[in-house]
Structure formats: structure tokens, C-alpha cells
Image (cartoon, grey):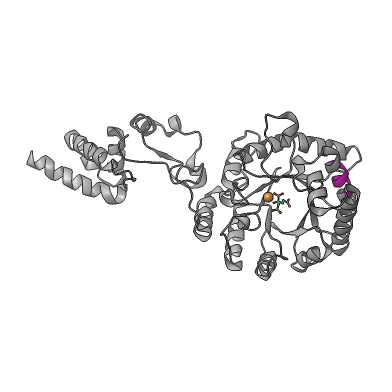
Amino acid sequence: MIQILDSTLREGEQTPGVYFSPETKLVIAQYLDRIGIDIIEVGNPAVDSDIALAISQIAHAGLKAKIGAHSLCRIDCVQKALDCDVDFLGIFFSVSPQRLYRDYNICLEKAIDKIVEVISYARTQKNDLLIRYTPEDTVRSPIENVIAATKAAVKAGANIISIADTTGYTNPFHPQRSIYYYVKTVKEELGKEGLYPQIEVHCHNDKGLAVANALDAYRAGADIIDVAVMGLGERAGIVDLAELLINLIDMDEEENFWQLSYLKDLYDFVSEQSHISIPPHQAVTGKNAFTHYAGVHVKAVAKDERLYQSLNPEILGIKSSVALGMQSGYAAVELAIKQIGREDLVRNKDLIAKILKEIKEISKRGTPIDIEKELPEIIERCTIKQLMT
Ligand code: HCA
Ligand code: CU
């Protein structure tokens, strides 16, 4: 069964301007745990003492999820993470020629020695620690380098290998530039030596393909997929938690293992704490994700919602709704009137026509009409007009 690693607290906090206090991090971790997330990556304790405190508090909070820290490929950093009592440790070090020669200034052999040394150290410190090794920028690294480094990492004690699309480079349509290819090849090559680590994938959204690539990796046999609430992260962020889960449960072979009804509260909380609003048309979690507007649509969904919905909002604990404005027809006005408890007016066709006319006029201001607040006022004005004619 696929596992989900949420990195809202680590990658998500790499969104410019975002800071989650240790208290906020704990609340987010509790929501993630209730949803059924398998691994929560909290952060790199070497970055700040607040992050170390948050990791330690969450690791001792009695959650079902495994709690993880992120670490540079250095023994002092690994030790800081171990001091927080984590179940999971992610160590990253790139083996792409561009990073080796233009950034780290070492050759591949030396890099592998370092990776082996640090992973071996972590393994000797904690026997049941889940150790992930990520050759950062995996998909822009020659596959031979990736295979050499990951083989050595697993032999040194890593249980998980992550294929990172650090720059959102992959595309399911390019055979050798797809995450599918990297997942399949690493699995096959390591398998030839009797090495069977779990395969994780970390997909950035630079070209808007993060979720598509994550599903491509799943198709290739990935075991763990990284996500963040609202897809937060460096630059264009990573895979959005809600979008991924909805696609996984949509596949016939995958059952719904997650408590999706907590998503809305979690997203509202993260949006508030990050000071980043959720676009209204955002898939799954946007305010309009299940709102129907144009006349033809509303008339159809009044009969059966599935005519314009491929998802059932009830699995998210929410109901679909209608919006009112220029595009509306009679069906929308009738539904909205019922929604505010004025079924008594539905048969008054002349009044409905007046209300619709006024709604269309108001919509020209270019902001949404608040049904609960504005519709009663519109009804009152139109009722007076009707009495006067
Ligand atoms: C980073 C880069 C990273 C690391 C992923 C990992 C990436 O911010 O450190 O360690 O598995 O995208 O490669 O997020
Ligand atoms: Cu990343």
C-alpha cells in the first residue's frame, strides 16, 4: 500500500515568508496524523533551535505517524537529528556532475565515501531508525551515478531511497526524463544485487506537473510519495496533499485509507498560519471546488450533482453549492431561495424573474454575491417592487 510523507513542516516552511511556530507545527502534525499520514518530516534541527524543539515535541506527542528530521550529509547534523528522538532521518547529497564539480568540489568516489560514512554512523546510533538517502536532483543526474550512490547507501544502512525531482524537471511524456524511468531503473538495478529499499519520490511543481509525476512514479512502483499542504515549498512548491489523495482514492485498486474530512480544517489552518490564501478554484480545497454557477450547469445538478461532478464532496465532509450572478438562470435562484429557507417563494415566478434580473445587475460589480447575507435583501427589494406594480 502506498505511504504518504508530508513535508509541510520542512519543505513547506521553505516557502518564502512562512514560519510555523513549534505550537503551530504540533497542531499541523496532529491533523496530519488524524488524516492517516504515514511519515511527518518536521525539519532540519541544525537550521534553528525552534525547529529542533518542534521535532522533539512532535516526536514525543504520541502520534501514530513516524516522525522525521531532515539532515545534511554531515555527522554533526545527523547527531542533532538523533538528539530529537526521531523515527526517521532523511539525508541528502547530490551526485550530479554539476553539483559535485561546481558546488561541492569533490569527485563521485569521494562523495560516495562521505554518504556511506554518514549513513553508517546513523545506523550504528539507532538500529530501528528509518534512514532515507536522497541523491538530490536525482533526475538530472546520470543514472550510473544514482545507481552507484544508492547501492552504497543501502549497503551502509539506508532503508529508503528517494528519487528527487528537485527542480520539477520530469515529464511523463519523455521516456528517459520521466520519474517513472528513474523509479523503475533504480528498483531493477538494486534488485539485481538483492537490495530492496523502499522507493520514495519528491516531485516539485515548477512546470505544474508535480501530481502527474507523482502518479507516474506510483505507476512505476514507488512506495512513498512526498506532499505538502497547499503544495507549499521552494519556488512553485511540491505535490499538494489533497490533490494527491483524491487521485489515489479515485483509482479503482486503491481503497480510501485516509480521513479526508479533516482536510478542510487543516487547509484553513495552514492557510491562516502561512498567510497564503487558497485560490477559490483550487482543486479539492478551493472555495469553488464544488460550486456550480452557469445556468445550464445548475439546472442539471439540481437533478443530479454527478452530471457536473466527477468527485463526491461528501467524502471530504462538504456539500456542493450554487453561486449567483450574471451566468445564473431560474434554477439557481430557486435553489438559493430554498437554501435560505424561503421555499414559500419558489412558485412566485414573477418574483423569481425580478430577483434574477437584480442579481444579474449586481454581478456587474465583479465580486461574488453572498447568498446568506445579500439574497434576503434582494428578495425584500423585489417583493416591494412587485407590490408596487
Ligand atoms: C532541499 C531539497 C529537497 C530535498 C529532498 C530530500 C529536494 O530543500 O533540501 O531530501 O529528499 O527537492 O531535492 O527538498
Ligand atoms: Cu524539495
Q: Position of residue 177 (x, y in %)?
A: 73, 34
Is there any visible trace of residue 134 in the rendered image? no
Q: Position of residue 149 (x, y in %)?
A: 86, 46
The quadrant where residue 40 appears = bottom right
The front one of 160 and 92 is 92
| Residue 375: in magenta span | no
Question: In the image, what residue occupies the spot 44% across and 40% down?
Answer: 290
* Left-right relation of 315 to 75: left
* Left-right relation of 54 to 223: left
The quadrant where residue 74 appears = bottom right
Screen quadrant of the C terminus = top left
Is there any visible trace of residue 89 in the rendered image? yes
Q: Position of residue 85 (x, y in %)?
A: 75, 66
The vertical placement of 227 against 326, above or below, is below
* Left-right relation of 259 to 386: right
The front one of 43 and 256 is 43
The quadrant where residue 189 appears = top right
The magenta segment is 147-152
Question: In the image, what residue occupies the spot 88% across and 51% down?
Answer: 112
The front one of 101 and 135 is 101
Count the marks. 0
* Left-right relation of 348 to 387: right
| Residue 148: in magenta span | yes
Q: Position of residue 101 (x, y in %)?
A: 82, 48
The vertical placement of 236 against 15, above or below, is above
